[in-house]
């Protein structure tokens, strides 16, 4: 009878070990799948964030470039007051140095 008990125990141990191996295989496979999914999700998120940052930088660069071109045009625009000389006054000879010295000479006589 002892042999039958040992044989029964050996059979149960083999079945238990087989079940443990199967469980370990499935849990390790599931862990590997979860790990791959997490890595893929992280890579996708990083790539999307980098693409968004690049798009923001490109939009800002285009905005700055168009603003600079609008403020400093390549072909200068004509100003409305370009023909008016600020240094001249309404009297013809009052701003010239000789007219000033002539005025001083007239006062001293």
Image: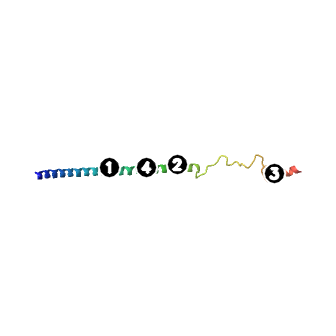
Q: Secondary structure at mark 3?
A: helix
4 or 3: tag closer to the N-terminus: 4
Which tag, 3 or 2, sits closer to the chain's start? 2
Gap in Å between the C-alphas at discs 1 and 4?
22 Å
Which disc number belongs to residue 63? Answer: 2
Label 3 Cα crowd, 10 Å radius (few <14 / some 14-19 / many 20+): few
Check disc 2 and report its element: helix, strand or loop: helix
Give the Cα distance between marks 4 and 3. 73 Å
Q: Is residue 78 left or right of residue 22?
A: right
Residue 8, x across and y down, in percent? 14, 50
Viewer-proximal residue among 17 and 88 = 17
The crowd level at tag 2 (other Cα within 10 Å; few <14, some 14-19, many 20+) is few
Mark 1: few/some/many CA within 10 Å (<14, 14-19, 20+): few
Of marks 1 and 4, which one's residue comes earlier in the chain?
1
At 18% across and 51% down in the image, what residue appears? 13
Between tags 3 and 1, which lies in front? 1
Q: Decide if residue 2 is on the left or right side of residue 102.
A: left
Q: Residue furthest left?
A: 1
Tell me which label, 4 or 2, sits earlier in the chain: 4
Q: Is there CB contact under 8 Å for labels 3 and 1?
A: no
Q: Which residue appears at 21% of the width and 52% of the height?
A: 17
Give the label on residue 78, or none.
Answer: none
| Disc 1 element | helix
**Alpha-carbon distance for marks 3 and 2?**
54 Å
Q: Which residue is mark 1?
A: 34
Q: Which residue has dot 3 on it?
A: 100
Q: Element type at marker 4?
A: helix
Residue behind mark 4: 49
Tell me residue 42's x, y (percent): 38, 50
Q: Earlier in the sequence, mark 3 or mark 1?
A: 1
C-alpha separation, residue under disc 4 versus residue under disc 2: 21 Å
């Amino acid at each position: 009878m002892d042999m039958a008990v040992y044989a029964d125990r050996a059979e149960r141990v083999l079945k238990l070990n087989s079940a443990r191996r199967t469980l370990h295989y499935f849990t390790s496979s599931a862990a590997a799948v979860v790990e791959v999914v997490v890595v893929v999700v992280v890579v996708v998120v990083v790539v999307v964030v980098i693409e968004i940052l690049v798009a923001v930088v490109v939009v800002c660069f285009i905005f700055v470039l168009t603003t600079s071109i609008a403020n400093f045009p390549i072909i200068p625009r004509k100003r409305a007051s370009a023909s008016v000389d600020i240094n001249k006054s309404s009297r013809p000879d009052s701003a010239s140095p000789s007219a000033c010295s002539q005025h001083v000479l007239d006062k001293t006589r």
